[in-house]
Image (cartoon, rainbow, N blue to C red):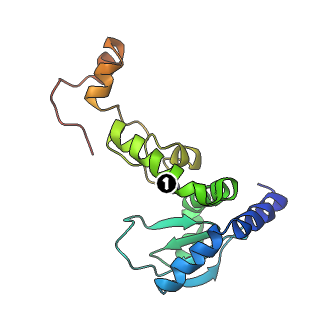
C-alpha cells in the first residue's frame, strides 16, 4: 500500500468511529497505546480471555496480548500485515464491519468448524498469516449436500469426526 492509502485508511477509520472504539477498548482494558507501522496504533498488554487470539484489530488499532515491539519484529511482519488488512476493512465498512464479520464467522464455523477458514474477511487478510487453516474440508453433511464429487474429494468415511 502507498502512503496515501495509509493516510486515507487512518482518516476513514477515525471518521467512522472504529478507531475511537479500538482506543476505548484499550483504555477500558488498560492496554498501552504505542505507535505501530503505516499509521496503525498498537495497544499492548491486553489481558482479557476473549478473543483467544494473540492479537485482533479494531479500526486502526491492533490490540495484542504481547508487546508492540513483539508485533513489530520482522518475524511477525506477516501477522502485522494481516491485522493491517483488517484495518483497511474497517475503513471500508465502518461499524458495519462487526455484524458482517460475525456473519462471516458463523458461516465459516457452520461449514468447516473453523471461525476463519471460509470467513471472507480472514481469507482476504490472509489465512496463513492469521493462523487459520487454509485447506479445511467442508463438514461432511455439507459435502454430501454438494453431491458425490465433493464427497469423493473429502476421502473420509461417513460418520468420522471432523477436525477442529
Ligand atoms: Zn484476522
The residue at the far right in this view is 4
* Left or right, 134 with reference to 42: left
Residue 102 sits above or below residue 32 on the image: above
**In which quadrant of the rendered image does the N terminus lie?**
bottom right
Q: Nearer the viewer, residue 61 or 64?
A: 61
At x 31%, y 12%, the residue is 148
Numbered disc total: 1
Can residue 129 be seen in this snapshot? no
Q: Secondary structure at mark 1?
A: loop
The residue at the far top in this view is 148
Q: Which residue is mark 1?
A: 130
At x 80%, y 61%, the residue is 8
Picture coordinates of residue 133, whole percent (x, y): 40, 44
At x 46%, y 76%, the residue is 66
Few, some or many residues within 10 Å of mark 1 (<14, 14–19, 20+): many
Residue 141 sits above or below residue 12 on the image: above
Please tell me in which quadrant of the rendered image residue 118 appears.
top left
Q: Is mark 1 within 8 Å of ligand 1?
A: yes
Q: Nearer the viewer, residue 64 or 18?
A: 18
Q: Nearer the viewer, residue 122 or 2?
A: 122
Picture coordinates of residue 39, whole percent (x, y): 73, 71
* Left or right, 47 with reference to 78: left
Picture coordinates of residue 131, whole percent (x, y): 44, 53
* Left or right, 16 with reference to 22: right
* Left or right, 157 with reference to 78: left
Can residue 69 be seen in this snapshot? yes
Residue 66 sits above or below residue 142 on the image: below
Please tell me in which quadrant of the rendered image residue 68 appears.
bottom right
Please tell me in which quadrant of the rendered image residue 48 appears.
bottom left
Amino acid at each position: 500500500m502507498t502512503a496515501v492509502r495509509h493516510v486515507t485508511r487512518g482518516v476513514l477509520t477515525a471518521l467512522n468511529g472504529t478507531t475511537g472504539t479500538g482506543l476505548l477498548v484499550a483504555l477500558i482494558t488498560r492496554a498501552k497505546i504505542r505507535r505501530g507501522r503505516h499509521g496503525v496504533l498498537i495497544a499492548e498488554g491486553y489481558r482479557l480471555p476473549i478473543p483467544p487470539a494473540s492479537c485482533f484489530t479494531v479500526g486502526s488499532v491492533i490490540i495484542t496480548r504481547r508487546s508492540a515491539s513483539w508485533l513489530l519484529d520482522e518475524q511477525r511482519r506477516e501477522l502485522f500485515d494481516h491485522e493491517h488488512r483488517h484495518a483497511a476493512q474497517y475503513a471500508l465498512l465502518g461499524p458495519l464491519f462487526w455484524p458482517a464479520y460475525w456473519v462471516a464467522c458463523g458461516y465459516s464455523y457452520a461449514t468447516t468448524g473453523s471461525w476463519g477458514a471460509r470467513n471472507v474477511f480472514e481469507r482476504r487478510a490472509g489465512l496463513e498469516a492469521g493462523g487459520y487453516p487454509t485447506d479445511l474440508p467442508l463438514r461432511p453433511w455439507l459435502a454430501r449436500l454438494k453431491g458425490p464429487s465433493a464427497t469423493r474429494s473429502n476421502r473420509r468415511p461417513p460418520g468420522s469426526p471432523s477436525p477442529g
